[in-house]
Structures are given as structure tokens and as C-alpha cells.
Amino acid sequence: MSATLVAASFTVAPTAGLTVWLAVSLAISIGGVITAMKGRWPWLLAGLVLGGIVWPLTAALLPAEAGSFWARRMRRPTGGRPSGG
């Protein structure tokens, strides 16, 4: 069997590459935003240098820095009366 016949028998949807590219780009973008919201500035810089490939991992695995936007938003109430009123 020649290489041409093998290549012709394997069919891929024309938009498969675009779909994968969009999915990866979306995952990297969301990971970058979450990494920034967690206050992980060195990892954000590393992602900029490495093309963002580390951002989904840092967003999923690293805890938020104390006082970061992510930590403030995800803090759960401890009970009792709310303060400030």
C-alpha cells in the first residue's frame, strides 16, 4: 500500500485543527486570568515567557495568595452576624 492511499483513507474534519486551537487558546486564556486573580505574579510572568502553557496548571493546582482577589472572593463566611452594619 502506498503512502498516498494511506493518507487518502484517513479523513479528518476540515475544522478539527481550528477547534483544537480554539479549545487550547481558551484553556490558556482562562488559566492566565485565574492565575492573575490568584496573585501568582511570578507564574504569570513565566506563562508570558513560555506562551501561557503553564497557566492552566497553575490555575488548577496552586492556592491563591493571601489577600488576592481570588482569595477574597472564595472566602466563605465563618458564621455569625455579617460585619459592617
Image (cartoon, helix red, strand yellow):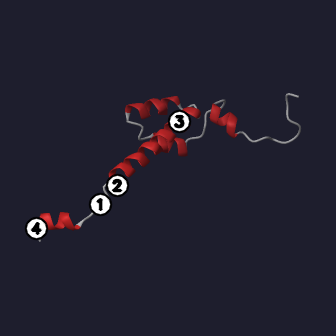
Of residue 2 and residue 50, the one placed in the foreground of this image is: 2
| Residue to which mark 4 is pinned | 2
Q: Residue at x 48, y 44 (%)?
A: 56
Q: Which residue is mark 2?
A: 16
Where disc 4 sits, the SS reads loop
Return the residue at label 3: 33
Three-letter residue code for mark 2:
Ala
Q: In the rendered view, does 76 fall on the left or right side of 35?
A: right
* Location of residue 83 with respect to 25 vertically, above or below: above
Q: Nearer the viewer, mark 2 or mark 4?
A: 2
Q: Nearer the viewer, residue 45 or 28?
A: 28
**Secondary element at image label 1:** loop
Q: Amino acid at mark 4?
A: Ser
The residue to which callout 1 is attached is: 12
Above/below status of 3 relative to 50: below
How far apart marks 2 and 3 lie (CA) works out to 26 Å
**Residue located at (27% from left, 63% from top):** 11
Q: Secondary structure at mark 3?
A: helix
Q: Which of the 4 image quadrants contains residue 53?
A: top left
Badges 1 and 3: C-beta atoms under 8 Å apart?
no
Nearer-N-terminus badge (3/4): 4
Disc on the earlier residue, 2 or 4: 4
Disc 1 to disc 3, C-alpha distance: 32 Å
Counting other residues with Cα less than 10 Å from the Cα at mark 2, is it few (<14), some (14-19), or many (20 or more)?
A: few
| Three-letter code for the amino acid on which mark 3 is drawn | Val
Foreground mark, 2 or 3? Answer: 2
Q: CA distance from mark 2 to mark 4?
A: 25 Å
Earlier sequence position, callout 2 versus callout 3: 2
At a point 55% along the width and 38% down the height, the residue shown is 34
Q: Tell me the CA gap for discs 4 and 1.
A: 19 Å
